[in-house]
Image (cartoon, rainbow, N blue to C red):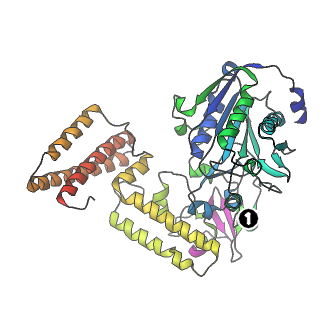
Amino acid sequence: MASCAASASKAALSRLGTVYVSKNRSIFANLAFEEWVFHQHNLEENGDALLVWSNDPAVVVGRHQNPWLEANIPFLDANGIALARRRSGGGTVYHDRGNLNVSLLTSQKQHCRPRNLRRFAESLNRHFGVKIVPNERDDMILQPGDRKISGTAARKAHGRAYHHFTMLVDVDLPFLKKTLKSPWADRIETNATRSVPAKAVGYLGQEVVGVTVEEVQSVVLDTFRSSFEKSVVIESSQVPVDYEKLTWDNVDLREWKWNFGKTPKFTIRLKDGRCTKVEQGVIAEVDGSVEADITTRCEDCSLSPSSTSEAWPPVPLVQSASPTVHFEYLGVEERYDIDSGALKRRFLELQNQVHPDKASAVSEDKKQLFEGHSSRLNSAYKILADPVLRAEYMLNAKEDDKSAESPEFLMEMLEKGEEIEHISSDKKLEVTRTQLLEDVERLKTEMADHFSKAKTDEAAATLVRLRYYLRLLSNVNSRLGFDSK
């Protein structure tokens, strides 16, 4: 690789380059955008491309890694930190808004990580008066102290390649280290790629007080654009497709089956000495049986059994927002017309199993795990118990999604709202309330029917109507002094 860095040191300016800037803070959205650029950017017409972004807190494992080995999953869940698996290889990294992510897309022929790193390091050194040196592992090392501030990974396919790297600008190092310290690392046996720990980790702000990600991004963009006669800048919001919902090679980067289920086979030794074989992220065998002790599974390794027994938890603690996860986690059938009484009883039963008070006399790791499960149970129950949140969850919809609204329906709702505003009699308001309650129940029945027949478009349209009717009902309840629910 050293020869590729030397061979192009005097390269002439290329005609055109493209810069993509993501304003999204979701790791899943940004990885999806990177995939969109990788597949859809036209290198021949638009030249090499550079993508930059920063995420909310996230831990990102390499394609062939084991998240239970590389990350502190209970800690991530307790602190609302996402875990994602990228398409490239390499080791595990921590992202947050104090970290700049850079992805450089070229043809495979022009792909050269040492050359890229040398150019960016030289520019950063000149601009900030620091000493950053790329090493033989294609990391960037901040001197003095041999502090790693950047790690590299790459992907090659279809005659093209991207080289992406992180740049730690300002980070809480103790927090970072805790996210990457697995409580099960010494008990896992696997052939999965293991991260190579750096001798020391640092960040640019240690040498340049007050430096911002925006300043570093500006230097990176200027360095890239200086290699071209002309360059264009495109923000993610300008891309005319919903790239977040696209899948590449049948991979949805948000799904549990990609982030956890793609983990290579491994064995974890439980604290009672038994060995547990795990395949595709679920327990396949525990010393010859899948009927392991429930408490051991729940407290010890946060893995899911592959059997259909009543053991719990049935899914790992950290999951992506798959529509089935909350139902599976609570052990109830995935359906819209859920039995609210049975759901509440199941919630209380499980909450009693993992209440943090039960972990007061055990290790800190187990206490964190109990707290994580308790928090997750509360979140799952809150969503499934509410008819609107439940529908939004099953549709992966958002509260502000207006795609199913029609002008006629909006006019109808405006007229209904005006009619209600002009009602002055409590008796008439009570009649209106009764009618609205019937309308809400009718819409819930319609919703259940649409979901049972997998008619998601119709369910989405009904959800819009249900939201409006519930708002009208809330208004009437408020005027009558009833509970808005």
Number of marks in the rendered image: 1
Residue 160 in view: no
Identify the residue at horizontal 57%, vertical 77% (top origin).
359
Q: Is residue 324 magenta?
A: no
In the rendered image, residue 2, in percent from the top left (x then y), is placed at 89, 36
Identify the residue at horizontal 60%, vertical 66% (top origin).
302
Which image quadrant for residue 139?
top right
Location of residue 421 with respect to 220 vertically, above or below? below
Segment tinted magenta in the rendering: 274-296
Q: Is residue 293 magenta?
A: yes
Which image quadrant for residue 361?
bottom right
In the rendered image, residue 147, in percent from the top left (x then y), is placed at 81, 52
Location of residue 378 with respect to 422 vertically, above or below? below
Identify the residue at horizontal 50%, vertical 75% (top origin).
353
Identify the residue at horizontal 63%, vertical 43% (top origin).
54
Q: Nearer the viewer, residue 361 or 315?
A: 361
Q: Nearer the viewer, residue 265 or 462?
A: 462
Q: Which residue lies under the disc numbered 1?
A: 185
Q: Nearer the viewer, residue 207 or 484?
A: 207
* Left or right of residue 483: residue 240: right
Q: Quadrant of the N terminus?
A: top right
* Left or right of residue 285: residue 396: left
In the rendered image, residue 316, in percent from the top left (x then y), is placed at 58, 61
In the rendered image, residue 100, in percent from the top left (x then y), is placed at 68, 43
Residue type, numbered disc 1: Ala
Label 1 element class: helix
* Left or right of residue 131: residue 307: left
Q: Quadrant of the C terminus?
A: bottom left
